Amino acid sequence: MTDDEPLVKVEVADQVATLTINRPKKKNAMSPALHAEMLERLTELEERSDFKVLVVTGAGDSFCAGMDLEECFMNPFEEPERFSQENKTAQAWFRLLKRFPVPTVAKVNGWCFGGGVLIVGLCDMAMAADDVTFGLSEINFGSFPGGGTTWAVAHNLGRKHALYLILTGKPFGAEEAERIGLINASVPRSELDSEIASLAETICKKHRTVLVAAKEVYEGTHDKTFGESIDWEMAKLYELSYVTGHDWITNALRQFADREYRPGFESYRLEDRGD
């Protein structure tokens, strides 16, 4: 990597956007400059409509080793305004990744510690190579996972699993990450690319507007009672029907009635609506 290479690389092809953290000599540890680039790239991608899946991964042999402690904490510590602003930039792209409109997938290709676990937790889905090591090591140097990392662990794992990892600081492998629910699957390293591609292909067969709506509906149920959720889901269904020209009735259900597809096994053929 040369000095003029971007810290965050973006590629969009075949309806899939791939965002690569590109600081391999530092195990893709996050720095203030990387935070700024990540916020800029994600903001740009949020405005685009030419992809249906966002894949987040790392360059080299790491996914993300967390925060660069020297650059993110030690160097700006005596400058409160700088420290605060740099943290706000980091938190801004974390929030953006969490609310990103289309499905997000973490492709965990190597070391994943601290803030790297946060990124995995913020993504909608995740797959990891089976030789990847994860960890929350903050407790080992007198701190705890911050900046949203404890939230990500608490909302992806059960209480005992989350507290065990937070309080012991012990590293764990990809199979354990799958078992406790941090990732969807641990796969042989040689199959990681193909498994991610297969998942992305499956998602890309869906209607983009429906993908966005499905995420919104899911996220909106967490702070609601069951009764409130029913109202929320039905309101969003009416909204979806309006913005898609009632596609799910006029197209998908018609194809079902004509026995042109089987629910659960195939996707209905989309009408040409610019998706």
Image (spheres, rainbow, N blue to C red):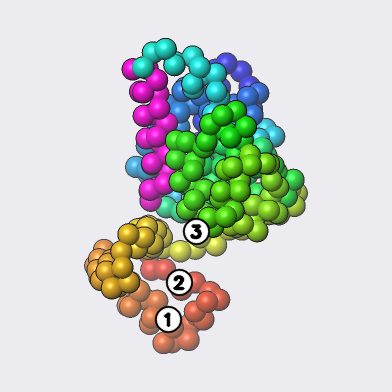
The local crowd at label 2, few if under 14, some if 14 to 19, many if 20 or more residues have their Cα within 10 Å, is some
Q: Amino acid at mark 3?
A: Cys
Number of disc labels = 3
* CB within 8 Å, label 1 to label 2: yes
Q: Nearer the viewer, mark 1 or mark 3?
A: 3
The local crowd at label 1, few if under 14, some if 14 to 19, many if 20 or more residues have their Cα within 10 Å, is some
Q: CA distance from mark 3 to mark 2?
A: 12 Å
* Residue at mark 2: 269
Q: Amino acid at mark 1?
A: Gln
- The residues colored magenta run 81-101
Q: Residue at x 69, y 34 (%)?
A: 61
* Residue at mark 1: 255
Indicate which disc, 1 or 2, sits on the residue closer to the N terminus.
1
Q: Amino acid at mark 2?
A: Arg
Whole-percent x, y for residue 72 in the image: 49, 22
| Residue 203 appears left or right of 192 | left
| Res 5 label | none
* Residue at mark 3: 204
Any part of residue 194 in sight:
no
Secondary structure of residue under mark 2: loop
The quarter of the picture where the C terminus appears is bottom left
Q: Is residue 173 above or below residue 91?
A: below
Q: Residue at x 53, y 55 (%)?
A: 159
Q: Residue at x 55, y 23 (%)?
A: 69
| Residue 107 appears left or right of 259 | right
Q: Nearer the viewer, mark 3 or mark 2?
A: 3
Secondary structure of residue under mark 1: helix
Instruction: Please say whether residue 91 is one of the residues in the magenta stretch.
Output: yes
Whole-percent x, y for residue 218 in the image: 38, 62
Instruction: Please say whether residue 123 is one of the residues in the magenta stretch.
Output: no
Q: CA distance from mark 1 to mark 2?
A: 8 Å
The local crowd at label 3, few if under 14, some if 14 to 19, many if 20 or more residues have their Cα within 10 Å, is some
